[in-house]
Amino acid sequence: MIIVMKPKAPRASVEHVVSVIRENGLETHLSEGKEVTIIGVVGDKTRLSDVNLQIAPDVEKIVPITESYKLSNRKFHPEPSAIQVGNTKIGPDNLTVMAGPCAIESEKQLLSIAHAVKTAGATFLRGGAYKPRTSPYSFQGLEEEGLLYLKRAREETGLATICEVISRESLACAAKYVDMIQIGARNMQNFQLLREVGRAGIPVLLKRGLSATIDEWLNAAEYIISEGNPNVVLCERGIRTYETSTRNTLDISAVPVLKSKTHLPVIVDPSHASGVWEYVAPLSRCAVAVGADGLMIEVHDNPECALSDGPQSLTFNHFSQLTEELRAYAALQNRAFKEAP
Amino acid sequence: MIIVMKPKAPRASVEHVVSVIRENGLETHLSEGKEVTIIGVVGDKTRLSDVNLQIAPDVEKIVPITESYKLSNRKFHPEPSAIQVGNTKIGPDNLTVMAGPCAIESEKQLLSIAHAVKTAGATFLRGGAYKPRTSPYSFQGLEEEGLLYLKRAREETGLATICEVISRESLACAAKYVDMIQIGARNMQNFQLLREVGRAGIPVLLKRGLSATIDEWLNAAEYIISEGNPNVVLCERGIRTYETSTRNTLDISAVPVLKSKTHLPVIVDPSHASGVWEYVAPLSRCAVAVGADGLMIEVHDNPECALSDGPQSLTFNHFSQLTEELRAYAALQNRAFKEAP
Amino acid sequence: MIIVMKPKAPRASVEHVVSVIRENGLETHLSEGKEVTIIGVVGDKTRLSDVNLQIAPDVEKIVPITESYKLSNRKFHPEPSAIQVGNTKIGPDNLTVMAGPCAIESEKQLLSIAHAVKTAGATFLRGGAYKPRTSPYSFQGLEEEGLLYLKRAREETGLATICEVISRESLACAAKYVDMIQIGARNMQNFQLLREVGRAGIPVLLKRGLSATIDEWLNAAEYIISEGNPNVVLCERGIRTYETSTRNTLDISAVPVLKSKTHLPVIVDPSHASGVWEYVAPLSRCAVAVGADGLMIEVHDNPECALSDGPQSLTFNHFSQLTEELRAYAALQNRAFKEAP
Amino acid sequence: MIIVMKPKAPRASVEHVVSVIRENGLETHLSEGKEVTIIGVVGDKTRLSDVNLQIAPDVEKIVPITESYKLSNRKFHPEPSAIQVGNTKIGPDNLTVMAGPCAIESEKQLLSIAHAVKTAGATFLRGGAYKPRTSPYSFQGLEEEGLLYLKRAREETGLATICEVISRESLACAAKYVDMIQIGARNMQNFQLLREVGRAGIPVLLKRGLSATIDEWLNAAEYIISEGNPNVVLCERGIRTYETSTRNTLDISAVPVLKSKTHLPVIVDPSHASGVWEYVAPLSRCAVAVGADGLMIEVHDNPECALSDGPQSLTFNHFSQLTEELRAYAALQNRAFKEAP
């Protein structure tokens, strides 16, 4: 941590800051320039977390030097992590494809989709049973009934399964039925839920908040890991910007940025990012080429009649064309693109 | 709802859309232009909510006409609402000032602040007992102990009290101690929590999400009201933009926009919006002048040592100077700025 | 300038950075922490502007300490500036109201508006003769003919006049007819034009770019002042965000931020910021209350038939109601709100 | 164009709107719903461009149906365009790689870089002679001297050359020396310059504005094409968002969005988008995979000493590794990646 003093700050103000730092058991290094004095802080900065030095007299600004996240930080864990889920692994050697409907609508629908996406090469079945919807008057999901269908689909196909949870209750319920749970964008900073997921220990896909910075996102992961659950996978799903030609703006640079900052695997959701099915194939190719560890793609047996997010869902045909195309890109990245056993 | 067809869409595509609409019990009006055909839908559009017409062949786009929120919509409730909380009222005739520390740190601190803000003209005491913090390693609040102090402060001063809740448990606990609860920006789309607040019936201050649109915000209010709780007050607290000279960007236009779209009262939080105490006074004046029903302001006995958000907190002196100044602005808006009894 | 090294950077990397700095004639201060080494640079940092130290081995980041703008910086010019334009002054003692049509359409129209806004209290007549329009097929302005009308309106009413320029040619032409020129949002970083305006010496209103940071804006002002023209007034006109209920998002906090960073006067344009005439009155009140030195407001004799930006224009009636209302707010700010002589 | 009336708008208001439309020589279709009446406009809407119907009594909103750009619109020109520049072609069958320094610093430097990038597979040499810089105190470019070096580099290597222009004068000068000119982000809506580029006829690379929407960008292209110059290539270079871990946010979805809306070629600049050289390789791969027609990449002989943008520049080694890697991605997209003759 560095404290930059205002130009020509009086000696007394500099000494006040220095004394506050020392009272908290830390050391200082002074750098006195022609215009400004800079105070470097040496030692464990968490001791200063209750002191608001930026409003001490004549302080211009405080510059943090070290990140607040530790367990997810690549500096302290340089090797990329692989997360085991069911009989599959998400991480540097694989390209993981998660596919399925936005919302689970019926057992028949889900099984039909599960078989189709498995055939095309997916190893994960996704399906929403608890849907966070902007309006209270929209379809909110089948809840436990939907989870039951996911369990059956896993038994029939061997696919690993994933479902979003939105509360302690849905977490407790989902943990009985699925292999991995998802924290959606709207709950990325629902810190209570993050802690509970941390205690539950189940593998978790943590989607990026609608306008979360990468630092906030890694701090959200830190909430989960610091409760004892290291099985965290990050999912870029687009951020909110002024551009309206896509539903969100896929921040594809987040993949290499995350690869430099964290050891956690990163997957990309081109369906929610764009909101338009025609863009899902090119964005999937680009996610693989940029180095993502996987994809989450919406697939529906009849998008025109989907109860949720139909416009961004692929048909079975489009999905199997896409996975066919992706094999070559996965090979260029030295990633296995294996089917479920 | 209007369906715009692509230029030169074949007759069969137009007829397909028309037949889908009619099958769902609605009527259509066709407008055939030189370049495009437009289909107006007449009747209750919720019947179409499970149909994704935008991906029907040759559909260019769907234009919604009516808002999805009803109970918070000013179209159906033209008079501005006033919300009774304790012995005070938030609404068109009053300027409500809520003040207090970001986080409650001790009983002594809270009582000292409560007396000071009451003397200066506040009618509400705010204080955080459950703090959503970006990093798991930051101070997270005193929880029930803090609520107890709020209760004592209310008994001593007569101030109404407000505290943020972050989960079903904290809601149940807070409802026993305080007059009004707050849903923070990070939980604005925690729909599970919104429903529970709706069922609890307690007055609620709903802060705008970090990058929520006004429509999403009013839909979040709709979640609460549709569960039977009409006592919702909205709080603008800044949105996320590219500009970094303030912590968030106070969207002051949101006040007149909300006044035109909803009957719910609107207050402004200049402390969280700017993150800098020097900007709190000018932004408070401007919030009153633009027509806000109140303000939420952070006040601390010793901002330099605050455990949370010290840099944006006012001292007692600055706060009482500010309320003195605000009286003239409240008078220009024909708002009473009464002290607690 | 501070150089932060990566954790455990080898001694050789630190020494490389230090030697580069010293070769450029500057001194260094080392602060060696447990985790990181920090190098403070002492002296005239412009000597380092051609050296990209952030890519030297093991450099984590460079933290700038001093702003790149000097002549517009309040640190070196603490007193607020007042800018004389014609027979009026923009600055701390006055509330300046600029009013008029978005685009000049005819002599009759402009004179009629000029008389109306003067009667209501404006001291400046605005009117566009060169219009930057998104589409090449929209009305682009009357050019020199419009400037001639502005000159006549000044002769008839005594109002100071202002007009946007978009090129060297329009600048040369406008300088012959009007008292102040405007650089619009789209040209805020047209550095060639800024330099020419600097050389022309005419007072200039510099609008904020669509998504310019405050630092970029002050650097744009620096382009003008560094060519010898100190007569710069800044105009906040809304920034681009994700929110669509207003055309832009008025960044009202920019006013107090600018007041702390620069001595230049700041005015607010609520018409372009909101794009909706109903919001112009509340946003004007709030701009005065926050401390702005003036307002730029679109007024039209018949907004429904305006050739440009009608929806945000006030009628004569609405404008005179607004100025009536603003007198009380100006008085609270100790600003004179004088009519033109 | 559709006009949506307010709920229960009186008959007179509807008739007023209808009569205004008819007076302008257009026809209307009425769609009377239970809640709202909608008026469709049939015919050439440019006739209504001077009428502001959205402020006519009881009008709720106006919904545009057709885009304002025509010549760049894929609806009227379904085949993708290929643009001939020098002896190379930018378009659907090729992957065009433009490479070179941000700013031209000396003849020796430019020739050295030109030979290196040619060897690695680039067909275009880029180099800035006129640099738009945020601060007036930064290096602004060698101007005509730099253009002369570009000409020599073309003579020596056969590479096509491209240089940014920032004014009428620099355009006139550059047109004598280079094969293609570039309009930078800050000048994307410098409409005067766009028209002049249109009249000059020289091939042009039009970079996206810092926060331009895709519609604004295509309208900017329309300015150039409507003056008679169809040789326009678009360049996505990142947009401004709240995220600060990259200099801008590369909007990779813009590539498929543009492919659906326009026939013009699209290239991607990962260097300016990210501002970090380590991210340039993964973002280049992803741009090819998503379907871009080319790349613009900064390459420097000694990035640590570059006078501009060194941190995002590749060394010769990194660049030739990257082009080697890109060959396989180009092949998957059926694009030739040919060296200059």
Image (tube, coloured by chain):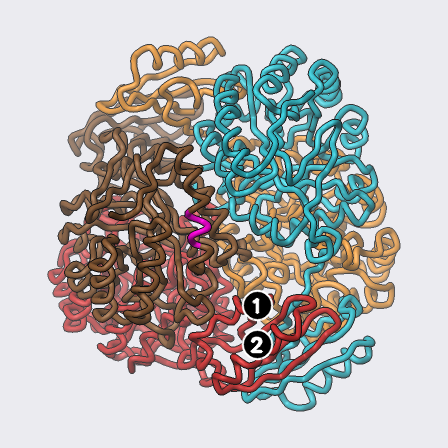
Chain colours: A cyan, B orange, C red, D brown
Q: Is residue C306 left or right of residue A29?
A: left
User: What residue span does the magenta drawing correspond to?
Assistant: D319-323
Q: Secondary structure at mark 2?
A: helix
* Quadrant that contains the C terminus of chain C: bottom left
Q: Residue at x 22, y 23 (%)?
A: B34
B186 with respect to C52 (left or right): right
| Residue that appears at 84% across and 49% down | B177
Q: Residues within 10 Å of mark 2 (few under 14, many from 20)?
A: some
Q: Residue at x 67, y 91 (%)?
A: A11
User: In the figure, D129 relative to B207: above or below?
Assistant: below
Viewport quadrant of the N terminus of chain C: bottom right
Locate residue B330: give its quadrant. Answer: bottom right
Q: Which quarter of the figure has residue B32?
A: top left
Asked if residue A157 is positioned above or below residue D323 in the image, the reply reads above
Protein chain holding label 2: C
Q: Position of residue A125 (x, y in %)?
A: 65, 24
Asked if the residue under mark 1 is in contact with the one under mark 2, i.e. CB atoms within 8 Å, the reply is yes
Which label sits on residue C16?
2
Would you name the residue on which mark 1 appears?
Answer: C57
**Distance between the alpha carbons at the discs numbered 2 and 1:** 8 Å
The question of residue A143 being in magenta is answered with no
Note whether residue B47 is visible. Answer: no
The three-letter code of the residue at mark 2 reads: His
Q: Give the amino acid type for the residue marked by disc 1 in the picture.
A: Pro
Secondary structure type for disc 1: loop
In primary-sequence order, the first of circles 2 and 1 is 2
Figure disc tally: 2
Q: Is residue D2 visible?
A: yes
